[in-house]
Image (tube, coloured by chain):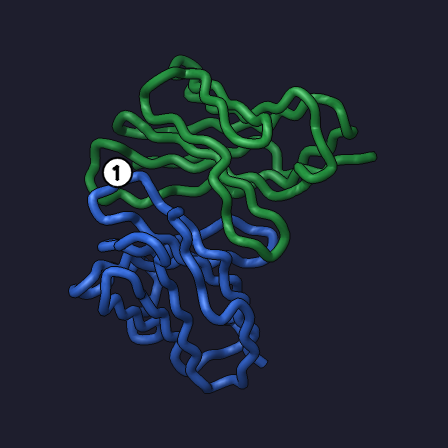
Amino acid sequence: GAVVSQHPSRVICKSGTSVKIECRSLDFQATTMFWYRQFPKQSLMLMATSNEGSKATYEQGVEKDKFLINHASLTLSTLTVTSAHPEDSSFYICSARPTGGGTDTQYFGPGTRLTVL
Amino acid sequence: AQSVTQLDSHVSVSEGTPVLLRCNYSSSYSPSLFWYVQHPNKGLQLLLKYTSAATLVKGINGFEAEFKKSETSFHLTKPSAHMSDAAEYFCVVSSRNSGNTPLVFGKGTRLSVIA
């Protein structure tokens, strides 16, 4: 149980295009999901907290107009990287907190590797 | 405010020898502490977590960690390393008393296992 999927697992796009990454909780509902970014050989940095039915909360320094987050249902959150540039190339990981679960319980997706040419 | 310091960026051990990955934390509230493992190009897998019960926490794959409040440490150990243990390990802290506080990750320790 407690499986989180991400789609796509890997994407390559041209500079200036937009890319959407999906995060799904497969066997539980998640009121809250989190989006992280991981640069090569570095730790995970929280980008934003996504709450179902409301606006996402972005961490300092993360451009909300560039990284659009939609959490339209209790099992799906999407991250759209708009007008992507090579510096946006990174490993993006989502996590989902089960509804009613402990505040420190999160299940992680397998990640999406974005390469912007 | 919370923070995590992983004292070693890289640890190398021989197969069959003990593993020690060090982690110190700082938290304004009672912390929850976690160790996650990440294999190359994979997501994170929870190894174990401490949430105020027993201070010695046993996890999967033979790993365990001991919460020491006096030393603000939560070091990860394993008696005998296996080749499949080679991966990146993250120590993570969360505050149980501060609502929706997200997880705070350490910088990671890369474990290499030599045959």
A24, B4: nearer the viewer:
A24
A75, A116: nearer the viewer:
A75
Q: Is residue A42 above or below residue B81?
A: below
A32, A61: nearer the viewer:
A32
Quadrant that contains the C terminus of chain A: bottom right
Q: Which residue is mark 1?
A: A102
Which residue: 30% across, 36% down? B1
Residue B103: % across, % down? 36, 43
Left/right placement of residue B100 relative to residue B73 reads: left
Q: Is residue A30 above or below residue B5?
A: below
Q: Which kind of residue does numbered mark 1 sit on?
A: Gly
Residue B102: % across, % down? 31, 45
Residue A57: % across, % down? 24, 59
Q: Quadrant of residue B11?
A: top right
Residue A38: % across, % down? 50, 57
Q: Is residue B84 above or below residue A14?
A: above
Left/right placement of residue B72 relative to residue B23 reads: left
Residue found at the far right of this picture? B115
Which residue: 49% across, 71% down? A8
Q: Quadrant of residue B21?
A: top right
- What subunit carries mark 1? A
Which residue: 47% across, 27% down? B24
A2, A80: nearer the viewer:
A2
Left/right placement of residue B59 relative to residue B25 reads: right
Q: Is residue A22 above or below residue B64?
A: below
Q: Colour of chain A?
A: blue
Which residue: 33% across, 19% down? B53
Q: Colour of chain B?
A: green
